[in-house]
Amino acid sequence: MAAILVLLIALFAPLAARAAPPAACESFSRSSPSLPELVRDWFVHSTDERVAMCPKPAAAGEQTRDLQYFGEGLVRQQGAVCSYHSHGLTLIGSGTRARLERYERSEALDMTLAGGAECPPPHAATGAAAYVETYDVSSSAFLGIMRLWSATASGLGDAAAAAETVRIAPDARAQLEVALTPERARRATVTRIVRIPGRALRQRYALFLTAPTATGADPAQYVIYLDKSLRKPFEITAFSETD
């Protein structure tokens, strides 16, 4: 397990520097009536549909928080999944010379399950409708992974549900039940899903989530590993705390 976690850190270290946009973002589209000069200038030089301006998480003892920026594409729906592309932007210069530049080559696909006729708006949704940052994850894989996690979280602490849930390794289930109470599992938030490079006939994924702590301190961070073999359903194979 430790070796897998080290591999993930090495593979996705560039992604770790790009914090996923929080829910409390101010989003500007090309048709917004009042655009900040930075955003207006960025739209002139890019094909992005929106720019999200989000507060960075405040460090301990800080009174103010810096802003982080994200360029985003159109929201599209494919079956039961809504998605849009996004990438990080960085602020260069200051004063009249300040400008936004794209700092990462990778493109995230933010996805959520469609709950009705229309897709939820980015950044405004919470809970089950919140968008999840994904890398190299198809809409069908996202649907299967989210459904499996939902069933797993609902079945923790339920002996009957545990007996019916055969798509989770016994060791992984035991670790989940030690780390998460049923209530914390139901309140956990999936923040990122990444496909791990490997063989075509056996797809492997890492699902990152945060869960509230009993003491009210910063949320705990976990990673769940999943496998998908040809003609077989998704299976949770391992679980680890990342703090």
Image (tube, grey):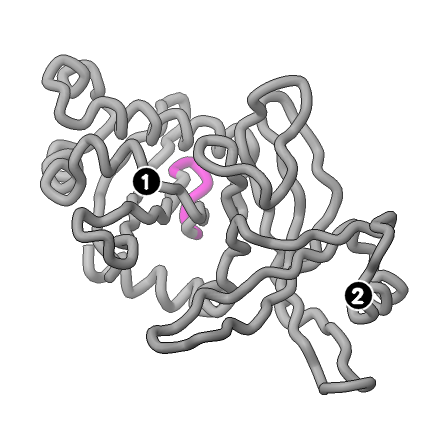
- Mark 1 burial class by Cα count in 10 Å: few <14, some 14-19, many 20+: many
Q: Which kind of residue does numbered mark 1 sit on?
A: Ala
Q: Give the answer, above or below, for where 93 lies relative to 173.
A: below
**Disc on res. 196:** none
* Residue 86 as seen in the image, left or right of residue 195: right
User: Considering the image in quadrants, where does the C terminus appear?
Assistant: bottom left
Q: Tell me what residue is drawn at x 59 percent, y 41 percent.
A: 124
Percent across and percent down for residue 78 are 65, 27
**Disc on res. 188:** 1
Q: Which residue is mark 2?
A: 36
Query: Is 164 one of the magenta-colored residues?
Result: no
Percent across and percent down for residue 75 are 70, 38
User: Considering the image in quadrants, where does the N terminus appear?
Assistant: bottom left
What's the CA distance linking mark 1 and mark 2? 35 Å
Extent of the magenta region: 197-202
The outermost residue toward the right is 44
Is residue 94 or residue 236 the one in the foreground? Answer: 94
